Amino acid sequence: MPPKKATRSSAKSTKHTDADAQHGERSDDVAQLKTGKRKRSAGVKSDVEKKKDDDACKASYSHWLMKSEPESRIENGVDVKFGIEDLKALPNQTGCWDGVRNYQARNFMSDMKVGEQAFFYHSNCKEPGIAGLMKIVKEAYVDHTQFDKKDVHYDPSSKADNPKWSMVDVQFERMTKRFIPLSELKKYHLQHKAKGGPLKDMALFTRARLSVQPLTAEEFDFVLSLENEDPI
């Protein structure tokens, strides 16, 4: 959504949300807050188990994919829209990536380092996909929206002396030479899954609900190379 008139962060808020409902990628972030503790099936990993998996793979990840909604959607009377053009329009083309309410996504943001690149992914829209590139300019710090009762991402269970949620600052770098749609990425994923290739285990398909996803250097380079290729 557009930046708030007043913010406690050093950068304007992106008001990031975690939705891809129209395309089967709806994030679990909000659902976890509303339902509280849930009995998990044997096939569902706990947060501790997921964190162990993340820790085991940290060394492989220095690139990211981060989702936000480019089309208007009203939540609790507030428009949560925030596309890459909105980031580009902010002062210094920089904003804080707030509103993440999923522990695994939060943990990935905690792993981010200044200078690392991320794809800006348009989600929950008519044509989801990669619109451009941004870079991390400030590492993880406390997300102030968790304490704001008027904010759509307010979390009454999070306390100032023990905050649950963090955010990073990102800066627009450039648009991709062409929009790279989810449909095209899925075709490559299926090809690579069957015959081998860099996108066979891409988190966009193996951890689709996450709004913040890690990419290996091989995955990032392959996806970026698609901007110079004709769509399939």
Image (cartoon, grey):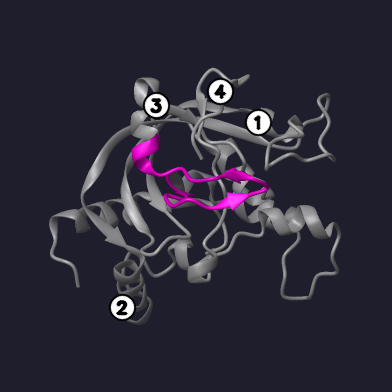
Q: Which residues are magenta?
A: 63-86
Residue bearing mark 4? 5
Mark 3 Cα shell of 10 Å, populated few (<14), some (14-19), many (≥20): some
Precedes in sequence: disc 3 or disc 2: 3
- Along the horizontal axis of the image, is 187 left or right of 121? left
Q: Nearer the viewer, mark 4 or mark 3?
A: 4
Instruction: Report the residue that reaches farthest toward the bottom.
Output: 194
CA gap between label 1 and label 2 equals 39 Å
Mark linked to residue 90: 3
- Along the horizontal axis of the image, is 218 left or right of 208? left
Is residue 71 a member of the stretch shown in magenta?
yes
| The quarter of the displayed image where residue 30 is located | bottom right
Q: Nearer the viewer, residue 54 or 149?
A: 149
Q: Amino acid at mark 1?
A: Asp
CA gap between label 1 and label 4 equals 17 Å
CA gap between label 3 and label 2 equals 39 Å
Q: Nearer the viewer, mark 2 or mark 4?
A: 4
Q: Nearer the viewer, residue 103 or 199?
A: 103
